[in-house]
Image: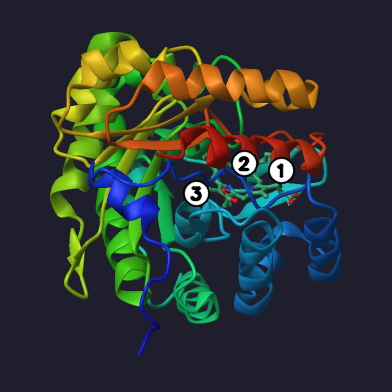
Amino acid sequence: MNAPLQNDLYLRALNREAIERTPVWVMRQAGRYLPEYKRVRAQAGNFMNLCSNPELACEVTLQPIDRFNLDAAILFSDILTIPDAMGLELAFETGEGPKFGKPIKSRADVDALPIPDPNDSLRYVMDAVSTIRRELNGRVPLIGFSGSPWTLATYMVEGGGSKDFSKVKGLLFSDPETLHALLAKNAEAVIAYLNAQVEAGAQALMVFDTWGGVLSPANYQEFSLRYMQQIVDGVTREADGRKVPITLFTKNGGQWLDLMAKTGCDGLGVDWTTDLSVARKLAGDGVALQGNLDPSVLYGSPESIRAEVKKVLDSFGDAPGHVFNLGHGIHQFVNPEHLTVMVEAVREMSGR
Ligand code: CP3
C-alpha cells in the first residue's frame, strides 16, 4: 500500500483548482548541476548504469526533492530507453551526448523493430518507479514520462543528437510512409510504456516533444501532434481513484498551443519564447500551463532571479492552473543555490 499524498499542489494545479500557492518543479531537476548527483553518477560508472539501477535511480530522483522541497518528483530515466529496448544500442559517451550503434536506415529496419514489453526489457524502469514511489512515502507526486514519437524518431534516424535533422527530415520528404510506420511503432511503444509506469506507481505523465518545433506547422500536425494525440487517447487517465494528468511539451511549439490543447491533455509545457499570457489566450481555460522561466536566468544574480520569477508569475496572473517550471531543462553549470532562490521566490510571491 502506498502512503497518502501529503502535498498534492501539483496535481490540483493541473486540475485547475484554486490553490494556496503555485507548485514548482524543474525539468532535469536531478542532474549534473548537483554535486550529490555527480557523486552517485560516478559510483554508477555511466549514465545507463545509473538509469538501470532502481536504488541509485531512486536516490538521485529524491536528491532535488530533499534539497529544494520541490512539489513533484520526476522519475530518473531517459526518453531514449525505448529505442534502446528496441535494439538500437544506446550509448552515452562522456561529453558527447547519446549515440545509437544501430540507427534506423531503411524501411526494413523499421519493420524489424519490436514493440518492447515494458515489464520485460524495460523492467528496470518500472522497478525504479515502484522504488521511488515507495521511498517518496507520499511526500509529493511522482511524474512518469516518455519522449514523443517524433522526438524519439529524430534520435533513432539521426543516430544521436542533430543540428539540422537532415536524415530524419530527408526521410520525411523522400519516404513519408516509412516515417509514419516508425512513428506508429513509437506511439504504440510509448503508450505501453507510460501505462506500465502508471501501473508501477506514476501519478502524472509528461511527454517531451523536444524537437517538434523544428517542423513546419503542417508537418508538426502530421508527424508529431497526430501521434501525441494517440498517446493522450491511449494512456491510463485515472489510477487509485485519482486523475493521472498528462502534460504535453513541444519545445518551440508556442504557436501551436491551441492545437495541443485540443488533444484533451491536462497540461501544456511552455518554453520561455512564449509569454504565458499569450499562451493562455491561445490554449484557453481547459488546460493548465507549465513554465516558463528561461533556464539562463539562473546564471544571473539573486535579485535578477527574483525579478524574473515575478515576471513569469505576473504573466500567468491570478487564475488557477499554473505549474511553475523552467522553459526547458536546467543547465549543467548553474549554481544550485540559485535554484534555491528561484524556488523560494515562487513560494513567497505566489502565496494567496
Ligand atoms: O528531469 C529529470 O530530472 C529526470 C530525468 C531526465 C533525463 N533526461 C536525465 C538525463 C529526463 C526527463 C530526460 C529527458 C530527455 N532526455 C529529453 C527530453 C527533455 C529535454 O531535455 O528536452 C531528451 C531530448 C533526452 C535525451 C538526452 N539524454 C540527451 C540529449 C542527453 C545528453 C544531454 C547532456 O546534457 O549531456 C541525455 C543524458 C541525460 N539524461 C543526462 C541526464 C541527467 C545527463 C547524462 C549524464 O549524467 O551524464
Q: Judge from the rendering whether residue 282 lies leftward or rightward of residue 2; answer left or right.
A: left
Amino acid type of the residue tagged 1 in the rendering: Thr
Q: Which residue lies most toward the bottom here?
A: 1
Quadrant where the N terminus sits is bottom left
Q: Which residue is mark 2?
A: 343
Q: Position of 299 compared to 82: left or right?
A: right
Which residue position is annotated with label 1?
A: 340
Instruction: Kindly state the secondary structure of the residue where label 1 is placed.
Output: helix
Q: Position of residue 118 (x, y in %)?
A: 37, 70
Q: How many marks?
A: 3
Q: In the rendered image of this protein, does residue 95 appear above or below residue 173?
A: below
Query: In terms of depth relative to the viewer, which is nearer, 335 or 350?
Result: 350
Contact between marks 3 and 2 (CB within 8 A): the answer is no
Foreground residue among 336 and 124: 336
At label 3, counting other C-alpha atoms closer than 10 Å, the crowd grade (few under 14, some 14-19, many 20 or more) is some
Q: How is the image coloured?
A: rainbow
- Does the image show residue 72? yes
| Secondary structure of residue under mark 3 | loop
Residue 79 circle label? 3
Q: Report ligand 1 position as a quadrant.
A: top right
User: Mark 2 near mark 1, Cβ–Cβ under 8 Å?
Assistant: yes
Picture coordinates of residue 315, whole percent (x, y): 41, 16
Amino acid at the residue labelled 2: Val
